[in-house]
Amino acid sequence: MANVRVEGLTKRYGQVVAVNNVDVEIKEGSLTAILGPSGCGKTTLLRCIAGLLTPDAGKVFIGKEDVTNVPPFKRNLGMVFQRPSMFPHMTAYKNIAWALQLRGWPKDKISSRVTEMLKLVHLEGMEERAFSQLSGGQAQRVVIARALAPQPDILLLDEPLSSLDAKLRDQLKFEIAEIHRKTGCTTIMVTHDQSEALTVANNVLLMFEGKIVQEGDPLDVYRNPKTLFSADFIGTNNMMPAKVVEVGADKAIVQLDGATTRLEAVSFPADIREGTPVWACVRADDVDIVDANERNRYSNVAEVDVQRSSLTGGMVIVEGKLKGIPFRIHAGGSGRFELLDVAGSTISCAMPNVSLIHRDQDDSVLKAQ
């Protein structure tokens, strides 16, 4: 295992800057997801770490060693690509054994190591199966086992689930997390799927236009967006224009534009002041429907005029307006079905977790997704 550090990393394709002066350190033993939309630079960053691309500027360190100009096969990495890259003419056993033979493992240790790897990825008894006899998920597990068998310092996963169907993706993402827990190998996974990153990783790097715009543990990135892009890309946020009216040590009070409604936020930029225009962000799945007679028991309660509601994937989605501002609620729980009949009425909503983002950020990102 080792940590990974990049300093001032830049990679261009002609006039396009795919990775723009990135500095980041990935801790030893972590499972880090590089998350972002297509074209944000996440795969380019991964390939620079792997040595498959040479950066135009900056450095890559694995542990204490500068590997910027070291070829991939000398970096002690394991790599898994989007599509299962299992050698089709070899059995599962021979695929994994090949990786060990390539690294010069003693012949008397190869068999036990292959058996150990097959057990790790739950493929015991499938040693002699060829690629054509395995499902897509099973073939990808063989490739993961092959990458881990020689005990690499770093495991790199380039959208390893994107070619699988939804059911297999759900199954394999939990297995990747389990494999990481068992091996402790520093793992970096590229994905454009928010749920995948938040489920599997213990550290998330969110990329946009070649830069890392937010880093943190999944829950923090999910609940406390630091940029307008973060709020828009991960899940569904209600973004309401407001102005700061009070700032304290641990909370800030804002007033919605064109309304008397005030909201209390505990997540906000350190540099905001009274009068600062902000977006008040509230997650659609972080809204509680409350009885109008008990609204005084809750903080941040406002009335929402419901326009429509619908059942989607087991969740009830309520769309309406809060003081004229579009507002969306994603409701779960056993009482959610009662919300299917509230169109045309007004409901009281509590918003316990409000985040603030500077409103001077370019809102074109909202139109780009």
Image (cartoon, rainbow, N blue to C red):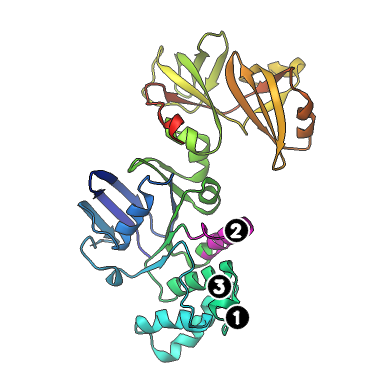
Does residue 220 lie above or below 276 as drawn?
Answer: below
Give the mark count: 3
As drawn, is 351 to the left or to the right of 242?
A: right
Which of 263/127 is in front?
127
Residue under label 2, please give it: 165
Residue 120: image tag: 3
Nearer the observer: mark 2 or 3; the answer is 2
Nearest to N terminus: mark 3 or mark 1: 3
Residue 164 shown in magenta: yes
Residue under label 1, please give it: 126
Q: Which residues are magenta?
A: 160-179
Q: Secondary structure at mark 3?
A: helix
Q: Residue at x 57, y 63 (%)?
A: 175
Q: Secondary structure at mark 2?
A: loop
Does residue 296 lie above or below 115 as drawn?
Answer: above
Q: Residue at x 47, y 79 (%)?
A: 96
Residue 316: image tag: none
Q: Residue at x 49, y 33 (%)?
A: 232
Badge 2: few (under 14), some or many (20 or more) residues near its Cα, within 10 Å? few
As drawn, is 50 to the left or to the right of 304?
A: left
